Image (cartoon, rainbow, N blue to C red):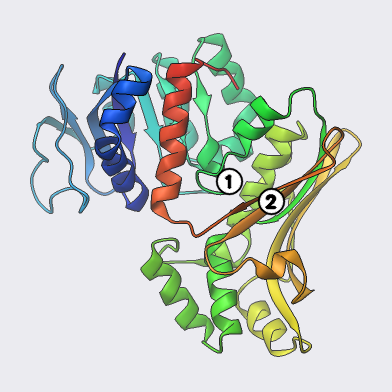
Amino acid sequence: MHLRIAIIGFGNVGRAFAGLLQEKAGELSSRYNLTCAITGVATRRRGGFIATEGEALTLEQTGLPAEGMPPGAVLHVQDTLTFLRACPADVVIEISTLSPLDGQPATRYIQAALESGRHVVTANKGPIANFYPQLRALARERALALRFESTVMDGTPIFNLAEFCLPASRISGFRGIVNSTTNVVLTAMEDSLSLEEGIAHAQQLGVAEADPSNDLDGWDASAKASVLATVLMEAGVTPAQVERREVGAEAMRRLQAALPPGHVLRQVAEGRRAGASAHCTVQLETLPASHLFAQIRGTHSILTLHTDTMNDVTIIEGESGPRQTAFGLLSDLIAVVRFRALP
């Protein structure tokens, strides 16, 4: 099978994904009979670049060229929706910037892709957190796949675990450390660095944006909690409905300074079923150093699912970054091929 791929967003994750496709080309071909060609790339600042029919773009790990079009591109359009209509693609990889409260404009891009008959793989939490039932219904109506493994814990198989390994199970809640930027900053502060030095380190690792407020203020974790509650618990919680307590830079400084001996600070996301809905929180918690969550440092993350069949199931991700998020995209791409699975 040959898949033509259009990518919306070409930052650290997009470049890592393009590199992973090249690196794994042999295994994709031999194990899954799959070949891939990136036929278009769109960014908010540069617009969209499209290859001619039957050809592919030549993309470098350093990103798009500073000027002009990348090798293989024959058409440049400024508007992303125009790009989606014009680009020859079977699958759209949507990895544009997160907007946690409204999921736009990424939701419009996903809708347009599905309406035009393309499978969608996204790492963007905003659309799934805010519009998952509508997007799922549209994908099912068009017999298309909508995959989103990378929305929570990078490429760690959370949704695949629930879908394929916990059949007939009811998930009643979750608890975890799911935001790498905040965890990098908090563990840097444990090591006597300043909050600003911790942010700079997270940016050097490629896990923090130039403006880390979505992470420190709990919006990224709220969007992830919303996705977990909506998808795994069918609870329909939006990021705006997640209760954020004691989050942000000032709270981090204040609580870190007041820590009792032998304790650490972690940003914890939690969800509990409450009737037909769920109550979700994101907050800074003071934990004893012996607590399992206290061992989760730097870019590590952890998630515990509360189930009626396996009791608590806990999964830990080691050091993460753009490559692990890119792997989540790749695993979803393979799922499109192997299962044609509908979420």
Q: Quadrant of residue 243?
A: bottom right
**Residue 193 horizontal/vertical position (percent):** 52, 87
Q: Residues within 10 Å of mark 1 (few under 14, many from 20)?
A: many
Disc 1 or disc 2, which is closer to the eye?
2
Three-letter amino acid code at the position of disc 2: Leu
Q: Residue at x 53, y 82 (%)?
A: 195
Q: Residue at x 48, y 49 (%)?
A: 98
Left or right: 68, with 236 as reference point: left
Q: Report the front residue among 147 and 310.
A: 310
* Alpha carbon distance from label 1 to label 2: 10 Å
Q: Report the front residue among 73 and 77.
A: 73
Say above or below: 64 vs 199: above
**Residue 1 horizontal/vertical position (percent):** 31, 13
- The outermost residue toward the right is 275
Q: In which quarter of the image is residue 2?
A: top left
Q: Label 2: which residue?
A: 303
Q: Label 1: which residue?
A: 152
Say above or below: 155 vs 178: above
Residue 272: assigned label: none
Q: Are marks 1 and 2 in contact (CB under 8 Å)?
A: yes
Q: Is mark 2 on a helix, strand or loop?
A: strand
